[in-house]
Image: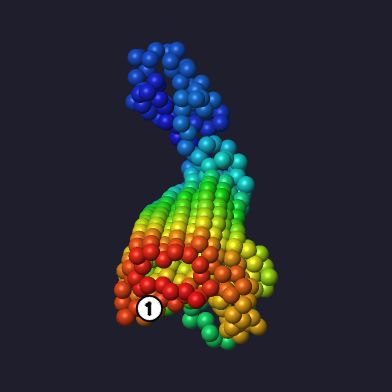
Amino acid sequence: MQHFLTVFIGNEWRGQCKCNQNTISELPASIDFKEMGFLMVVLLSLSCLSFGSQITSVATYDVTSYGAKGDGNTDDSSAFLRAWDDLCGDVSPEPTLIIPSDKTFLISPVAFSGPCKSPNVNIKLLGNITAPKTLDRWKDCIKNNIWIHFTSVQGLKIQGPGQIDGQGSIWWRKEGQPKTSTCNRPTALHFNSCNGLQLRGTKHINSPMLHISINGCEGVDVGNIQILAPGDSPNTDGIDIGDSSHVNIHDSNIQTGDDCVAINGGTHDINVTGVFCGPGHGISIVSLEENGGYDTVEQVRVENCNISGTTNGLRIKTVPYGTGYARRIVFQDIHLVNVENPIIIDQHYCSNPEDAFCPALPNASAAKVSDVMYTNIYGSSATKQAITFNCSGKYNCTEIVTNEVGILGHDEISYCQNTQGKFIDTTPPISCY
């Protein structure tokens, strides 16, 4: 593997040299040796060998150098793993995995594991990645129900513009039919314990289930990505976040068959900004622990988003008999177009009507919902009931504030029970009991 070193003298670029750990293989003609003199040549050579402070080294690992074909049919998983092993073992500042353009790489379920020796690891996704196109080509799908899994990789940065195609249609057709396989629908891309994660400029399509799952991560930035799946594709959430903190989702286009962004329990300091959502189920704070389980969501901000043609807009849902809280939540500057439930808090949510706790009793306990603010929310409702605050009789929703909220539609109304707060300049008007 060759490493290319960019050489500077003072602030002036002078060329590159190719080095390995023991030798210099080339010094470029662009360096003026007469001008620098023999001593400078010696110093430059020593610097190239020692990776001195004035030399910037970028170690790159191209998957095709490890045998990846990129023909869309050959399983390139082993080649990717070999490249990853070398990348992860590199001690240079920012080793980079190259997935080249104009190729489509088929990979089976695979795990890229850390910790890596470098504090920052880059992946340049220039080409495309595709999942197997038939169920019989999936391997180990029972093991973790994940297709591409990154775990314990710190400082991971994935840059587009390449595409990740989950080939979800072969799984969606099986929904609701008798199971003929023990495989469950996998999440396409899962990050676990990857602090400092950055995901930029990638395109994600047709996941069998969740497109992107972020769990146990801190300091995450996801921006300028596209996530696309048919509006009727089951459970194809765009981005699911759980047990994570300091997460920014911004400037992205998410059109799926379920939640565009789902903020689950164990999360703190989550920001969603500049996201277009729809179709799908909106932006949701979801399903805190049931049957007495304890879970929390705190300090969430959703701002400057457009939501269109979804079944829900801005949703907080908790299941009955859970414990914990969802609080310090801000929804601001949101445009809603033809949304079925534009604003909704539902503390009686039942994901499966056959569960023993569904429907819940009116006074069933639930995670406490408090300190929620809706400001400058406007647009149109596809149904008559534009605002719904359906809170628990045991733990009322408290400190719920609407200010400058205007949702128009079909003689729109609001529904509000067991909710305390202030409702200012709000259409339709809110009256609670």
Question: Considering depth in this image, is 250 or 420 the residue closer to the camera?
Answer: 420
The answer to whether residue 408 is seen in the rendering is yes
Q: Position of residue 132 (x, y in %)?
A: 50, 69
Question: Considering depth in this image, is 268 or 416 the residue closer to the camera?
Answer: 416
Q: Is residue 287 above or below residue 68?
A: below
Question: Considering depth in this image, is 8 or 362 the residue closer to the camera?
Answer: 362
Which residue occupies 31% across, 80% down?
410
Report how many numbered discs are placed on residues in the image. 1
Asked whether, in this view, residue 210 is left or right of residue 253, the answer is right
Callout 1, which amino acid? Ile
Q: Position of residue 192 (x, y in %)?
A: 59, 56
Tell me the residue that label 1 is attached to: 413
Which residue occupies 62% across, 47% down?
115
The answer to whether residue 169 is seen in the rendering is no
Q: Quadrant of residue 179?
A: bottom right
Question: Considering depth in this image, is 200 or 27 the residue closer to the camera?
Answer: 200
Q: Is residue 17 above or below residue 306?
A: above
Residue furthest bottom as drawn: 178
Helix, strand or loop at mark 1: strand
Which residue occupies 52% across, 52% down?
269
Asked whether, in this view, residue 239 is left or right of residue 30, the answer is right
Q: Quadrant of residue 413?
A: bottom left
Q: Position of residue 196 (x, y in %)?
A: 53, 47
Residue furthest right as drawn: 292
Q: Is residue 360 above or below residue 220?
A: below
Q: Quadrant of residue 91?
A: top right
Asked whether, in this view, residue 54 is left or right of residue 308, the answer is right
